[in-house]
Amino acid sequence: MFLTDGRYTEQSRREVEGLELRTYAQDLPGMFATACRDLGVSRVGFEAAGVTFQTYEKLIGAVAFELTPVGEEVERLRWAKDPDEIALIDRAQALTDEAFDRILPKLVEGIEEREMALELEWAMRQAGADRSAFDPVVAFAENTAEPHHQPSGRRLRRGDVVKMDFGAMCAGYRADMTRTVAFGDPPDELRRIHDVVVRAQQRGREAVRAGTTAGEVDRRARDLVEQSGYGESFTHSLGHGVGLEIHEGPALRAHSEDSLPAGAVVTIEPGVYVPGLGGVRIEDMVEVTEEGCRVLSRTPRELVIL
């Protein structure tokens, strides 16, 4: 049984198949209690990470039976994508690649980070995306040292590196890609860092295979960064799953024992960030296969100098 309010009744008729649809007005707890009685259930699970305490109190006050919190049972079922889901993620990535091609000519001296962020969103819409999968990250020069910098009024100057983390959404499924390019000749150290990150990303991709632990994939890429002298500057996990949400499991982080299932779509995104100088991140989504992985993007990883 599917419960919704009147805003989504017609949408639900199109999108929800195989379930009885019921619409409530203001009284969700009452409708919930009636639905449980009609279905004959005496114990209901709820997603602990998604239901607020306030909502829980209202629901528990409407029924005389147990409400049981559940963890990632639902989310883990979503780790491995079916072919239709893979096709939609592929489409979202294709639109993201096209947006990257569209955006490079927009990188002109004097443009602000926040202007570029808007241009990125528009480029994805022009390519055919439903919308942006998340708020784009656009950073210039010293701001690229912040992994998730909020676009500001900082203007682009010759010699700056530009980090763009963005993705398109297609029919509810998302893409995620990061590229770091240079506007003119970048500092020599950032060239070296870019080379380190590209090689670490390749090492991570080569480690992906169904049955491999997420922690092992993270370790393979992280070891190369550490051996290059930038271990302390790689400050986040190697990647994450992507699908209906931009961050889902499995999480490719240090020491994780999660086994990668065939059909999962995960990001491989090492980064090196040096305060006062800048940073580099290279990110691609890959589909986990029995033989290894399939890279979804077509955008080159080599340093582009504009």
Image (cartoon, helix red, strand yellow):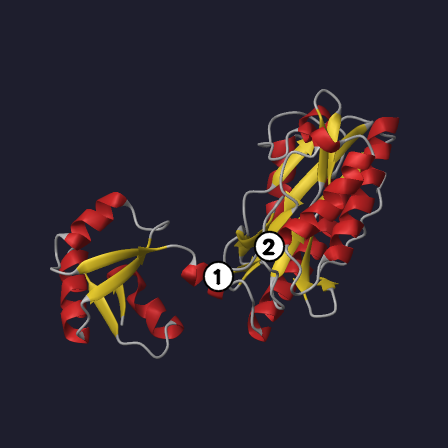
Q: Identify the residue position indicated by label 2 in the image.
A: 168
**Residue 145 pos. (x, y %):** 68, 28
Q: Amino acid at mark 2?
A: Ala
Q: Nearer the viewer, residue 15 or 105?
A: 15
Point 57% across, 32% down: residue: 150
Q: Residue furthest top?
A: 276
Q: Residue at x 29, y 46 (%)?
A: 52
> Going by the image, does 254 lie left or right of 102?
left
Look at the picture and state if 228 lies above or below 297: above
Say if residue 69 shows up in the picture: yes
Q: Nearer the viewer, residue 110 or 179?
A: 179
Q: Quadrant of residue 294?
A: bottom right
Q: Name the spot of residue 214 as percent of width and height, x first.
A: 63, 53
Q: Position of residue 44 (x, y in %)?
A: 25, 63
Considering only order in the chain, which callout, 1 or 2, is on the residue closer to the N terminus? 1
Q: Residues within 10 Å of mark 1 (few under 14, many from 20)?
A: few
Give percent across and percent down for residue 70.
Answer: 35, 56
- The N terminus, quarter of image: bottom left
Which SS class for mark 2? Answer: strand
**Marks 2 and 1: which is nearer the front?**
1
On residue 76, the disc is 1
Q: Amino acid at mark 1?
A: Arg
Indicate the quadrant where residue 270 lies. top right
Q: Is residue 84 left or right of residue 159?
A: left
Image position of 290 with respect to 123: above or below: below
Work out how far the residue at label 2 is from the one at label 1, CA to CA, in angstroms. 23 Å
- Relative to the observer, which residue lies in front, 78 or 207? 207
Task: Give me the disc on residue 293.
Answer: none
Please identify the quadrant where the C terminus is shown.
top right
